[in-house]
Amino acid sequence: MEQRPAEILLVEDNAADVRLTEEIFKEGGLSFNLQVARDGEQALAMLRREGEHADLLMPDFVLLDLNLPRKDGREVLAELKQDPVLKRIPVIVLSTSNAPRDVLSCYELQANAYICKPVDLDEFIELVEAIRAFWIRFAQFPPKS
């Protein structure tokens, strides 16, 4: 039985990180659909399927940057995890910050993982490949409601 493509929401305002993440996911030969939100407000609109996003499929997981325009990643995470339907979606926080207070606050807001983005290109590629392998190939997601 063929598995349906994984639905991923990448919330990232850095165009270079978006482009690189897309390319690394494509190289894996796994089936996925990647939607990109460039700020926190757009991410929540996409998750809630508001307005022009009404036809989007619910993501299987979210890759969330913390430092976003309009509404930061902590606010997005807090709102997502307070919603009775959206709270089931796994959220992987990707941040340049390794500050203990950021890590702790994200886990307190029920992030499923907190990963510090490496600045080294090879390490970033390795990180995205690991995320792709685990979250698309092996992880099981809650049923869609």
Image (spheres, helix red, strand yellow):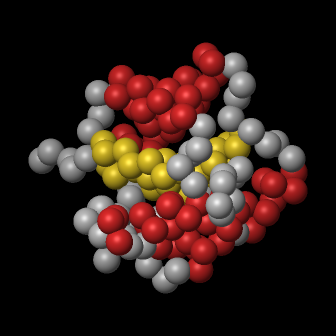
Give the image quarter of residue 135.
top left
| Quarter of the figure that contains the C terminus | bottom left
Question: Residue at 46% of width from left, 40% of height from top?
Answer: 134
**Residue at the image position 69 percent from the left and 19 percent from the top:** 120
Query: Is residue 11 or residue 83 the one in the foreground?
Result: 11
The structure residue drawn at horizontal position 44% and vertical position 52%, both measured from the top left corner, is 9
Instruction: Tell which of 78 and 112 is nearer to you.
Output: 78
As drawn, 40 above or below 130: below
Q: Is residue 40 visible?
A: yes
Name the foreground residue: 133 vs 77.
77
User: Residue at the location (39% across, 49% down)?
Assistant: 35
Residue at the extreme right of the image, as rendered? 100
Name the spot of residue 97 as percent of width and height, x first: 79, 43
Name the one closer to the observer, 64 or 52: 52
Q: Residue furthest left?
A: 1
In this rendering, is residue 23 above or below 6? Answer: above
Q: Position of residue 11 (x, y in %)?
A: 54, 50
- Tally the numbered discs: 0
Task: Give the percent coordinates (x, y) of residue 68.
Answer: 66, 52
The residue at the far bottom in this view is 84
Tell me, yes or no, if residue 88 can be seen here.
Answer: no
- Residue 50, image x, y percentages: 38, 73
